[in-house]
Amino acid sequence: AQASLASALSSATQEARGFFLKMEAYRLLSLLFANKPDTEGSSDMEKIVLSKIHETQDELLTNVNKTLSNEEDMKPKFAKAVFKTLEKMLPFVSTPISSDARDLMTAIKIEISGLGDKQKELNTVAAKLVEQVDSRLEELNAASAKTVENKAKSPSGSKKTKKKKKKKR
């Protein structure tokens, strides 16, 4: 369900006609991401699901950012639904992370802290979520730096070629 519904629900958060339908799309997304990903010892099906979610993570982050930056629809109840979805989705954002996704997470963090400042009832929830986004960004940056180091350490030109001997007739 996660592999096939994530993209459709993500687009429903933007294209739904009414406020209630958008909120329901976010509620369903949060239920979809309720189980944390298990990267170790996962089955082939779980690996396929995680790769499908990884393919759509930019789209998911873009839609969350669009929703948070749209101030007309941002009521406290709706904001809490979006925050809950983002909180559940963060563990699924995985490496290799694109620079766009990194920028989107930073923009989302700014929007969340802005909403926390504007609406007093969201202040504590927003502060907690900003910390979670920060820690996830640090983890992703550390993981991407580690992969860059590993690529730099692996010798690329050290392969030896063997010459074939020609047979005499």
Image (tube, rainbow, N blue to C red):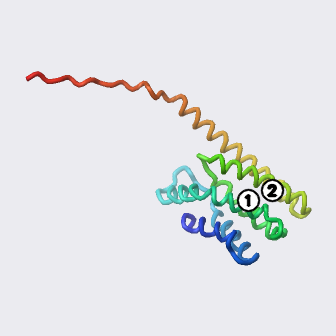
Position of 33 relative to 131 (above/below): below
Say which of 39 and 119 sits in front.
119
Disc 2 crowd, CA 10 A, few/some/many (<14, 14-19, 20+): many
Q: Quadrant of the N terminus?
A: bottom right
Q: Which mark, by number, is residue 111?
A: 2
Residue under the image location 29 percent in, 24 percent down: 162
| Label 1 close to label 2 by CB (< 8 Å) | yes
The x, y position of residue 62, in whole percent, is 68, 58
Which residue carries the number 1 mark? Answer: 65
Q: Is residue 17 left or right of residue 44?
A: right
Kind of residue sitting beneath label 1: Asn
Residue 86, how many percent across, how many down?
Answer: 72, 60
Residue 147 against residue 62 in the figure, above or below: above
Looking at the image, is mark 1 or mark 2 earlier in the sequence? 1
Q: Is residue 113 left or right of residue 95?
A: right
Tell me which residue sits at (83%, 65%) in the image: 71
- Tag 2's secondary structure? helix
Nearer to us in this view, 72 or 51: 72
Per the model, the C-alpha gap separating discs 1 and 2 is: 8 Å
